[in-house]
Amino acid sequence: MSVLKNKTVFITGASSGIGKSCAEYFAREGARLLLAARRQNLLNELADLLKQKYGAETHCFKLDVSKHDEVVTQLEALPEQWKNIDILINNAGLARGFNKLHEGSVGDWEEMINTNIKGLLFVTRYVVPGMVERGSGHVINIGSIAGKEVYPHGNVYCATKHAVDAITKGLRIDLLGTPVRVSTVDPGMVETAFSYVRFHGDKTKADAVYEGVDPLTADDIADAVLWVAGRPERVQIAEITMFPTAQRSSMHISRK
Ligand code: NDP
Ligand code: 8X3
């Protein structure tokens, strides 16, 4: 039997891409899923599909992680049987804009900082005390190669993912002496709605990012997250960095 069976797994940003794939991978293992994002209709559709395919038990709720009041109110309002979260997957995040810093949009910066840094902090701050109290839990952050390298026009997005890297390391250290594990999965190029969102819905620009490359898929990342979560309790995977074979760094991409 899977070690993840009946574990309660909370996935932020489960309506699309990596979060959605994680939901499917954990559902297949028999985990109970708390699914959150702003687009609740997509979460409901996903929950129906996972019930049909795997008999998965899910609870979906609308959540904008960047709003502290909403995070507290929504998590406070969880039904009793959903309050004990075993695994938190901090996935909700986005890039907005692709400009030189001195030509960038303050609105884009605020959205990235509020979601990728503050949103992750708000959710983590709420969930982790329960893990410490119960003496078990695992936080898995979705970082990025952008948290390890900086590339042209990546400036503020890279800064937010460097912050995620620092927060991951800080949390891991601060939880020393507890059984709560902290991990990060840091992908390079993954084909999802990510670039479409980054380019404010410009499909031509988004498609060009993946042109001539066989990028990672959201499922590739979910597979890694599932592996991280499934290790025996004495094993804490600190970080996994993943690239498509055609990518060797943020700046080294071989295109056909
Ligand atoms: P998608 O755009 O496909 O998914 C992003 C998810 O985040 C959506 O479900 C979206 O849901 C959710 N989200 C965005 N803002 C908020 C918010 N304020 N509150 C709650 N949910 C939010 O992109 P990916 O799957 O690629 O991105 C997932 C994570 O992976 C991000 O953290 C991203 O930085 C990271 N990443 C992506 C890479 C890539 O190349 N694709 C590579 C490395 C890391 P909704 O809009 O419904 O709220
Ligand atoms: C997403 C990957 O290289 O666009 O985090 O920053 S990258």
Image (spheres, helix red, strand yellow):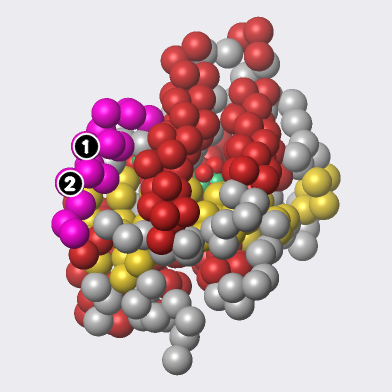
Residue 40, position as x, y percentages in the image: 22, 48
Image height of 168 relative to 18, above or below: above
Task: Give the main secondary structure, helix, strand or loop, of the magenta stretch.
Answer: helix
- In this rendering, the answer to whether 243 lies above or below 129 is below
- In the rendered image, residue 77 lying in the magenta stretch gets the answer yes
**Could you tell me the amino acid type at mark 1?**
Thr
Element marked by disc 2: loop
- Residue 131 percent location from the top left of the image: 43, 56
- The answer to whether residue 175 is left or right of residue 63 is right
Secondary structure, mark 1, is: helix
Q: Which residue is mark 1?
A: 73
Please provide the residue range marked out in magenta: 66-80
The number of numbered badges drawn on the structure is 2
Identify residue for label 2. 77
- Residue placed at 64% from the left, 51% from the top? 176
Q: Residue furthest bottom?
A: 1
Q: Residue 121: give x, y in percent of width and height.
A: 47, 35
Mark 1 in CB contact with mark 2 (< 8 angstroms):
yes
User: Residue flagged by tag 2: what amino acid is it?
Assistant: Ala
